[in-house]
Image: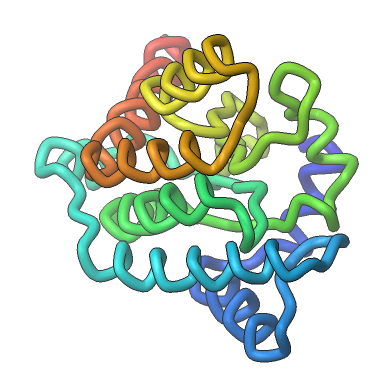
Amino acid sequence: MKNSIAKSLFKSYPYSEYRKLVTDLLSEGKSTGNQQSESLTNYSKLNDARMNRLDKTTKIADDVVSKLENLDHKYIWLVISEGWCGDAAQILPILNKMALASNKKIDLRIVLRDENEELMNQYLTNGGKAIPKVIVICKEAGIVRSDWGPRPKGATELLANYKKEFGVIDEKIKTDLQLWYLADKGISVQEELMQIIENIKYNRL
């Protein structure tokens, strides 16, 4: 296992502890991350409320549950996140429900981007530190098999098309992106992560 992965895993949080960390910081008027500002704290508050809702309402598709329950190998899903990240707030509750459905075949662990710069720099998206990033690790072998993120393909295309047309990422597209997630109901995240697992299985043959 890469040293950066091992170091980050040592500092990682299970989902429940990550949620508590974000909530505790908010009670102090803070967000996660090296930078502190009123806007980042407000984003964190919004995300905390959103994750509370998604923890209650997110459903994993029956066919996905069946596949998760019958995985041939155990995995660690190491996720790079921050409490102020809107995409992470939409995606982490889905990953948690998938992990819970897997009969302990998936161990979901979360690390903060700004505290794990070495790891983040290995998983840049077009040269940027976009999050969340899911690193799929074979638990038995300690080998990174794949990575995913920072968002589903449909959401990525929506953002790219808007930026191409208007040249900016503004509040309108951020709102449109949240509406996309609401309509998608977590299906794209489930399908894309399961496709990664299928590809790993196929490549083992």
Above/below status of 18 relative to 108: below
Give the quarter of the image for residue 29. Answer: bottom right
- Total number of numbered discs in the rendering: 0
The colour style of the image is: rainbow
| Residue drawn at (50%, 75%) of the image | 16
* Image-based side of 165 in relation to 127, left or right: left
* Image-based side of 70 in relation to 204, left or right: left
| Residue drawn at (85%, 61%) of the image | 35
For the view shown, which residue lies furthest in the left direction?
62
Give the quarter of the image for residue 184. Answer: top left
Q: Position of residue 146 (x, y in %)?
A: 57, 24
* Image-based side of 45 in relation to 13, left or right: left
Above/below status of 104 relative to 37: above
* Image-based side of 90 in relation to 42, left or right: left
Q: Position of residue 26 (x, y in %)?
A: 64, 82
Instruction: Specify the quadrant that holds the C terminus.
Output: top left
Question: Can residue 137 be spotted in the picture?
Answer: no
Instruction: Specify the quadrant that holds the N terminus.
Output: top right
Q: Position of residue 5 (x, y in %)?
A: 77, 43
For the view shown, which residue lies furthest in the bottom direction?
27
| Residue drawn at (35%, 51%) of the image | 94
| Residue drawn at (26%, 55%) of the image | 101
Q: Nearer the viewer, residue 180 or 97?
A: 180
Question: Can residue 1 be spotted in the picture?
Answer: yes
Q: Position of residue 74 (x, y in %)?
A: 45, 44
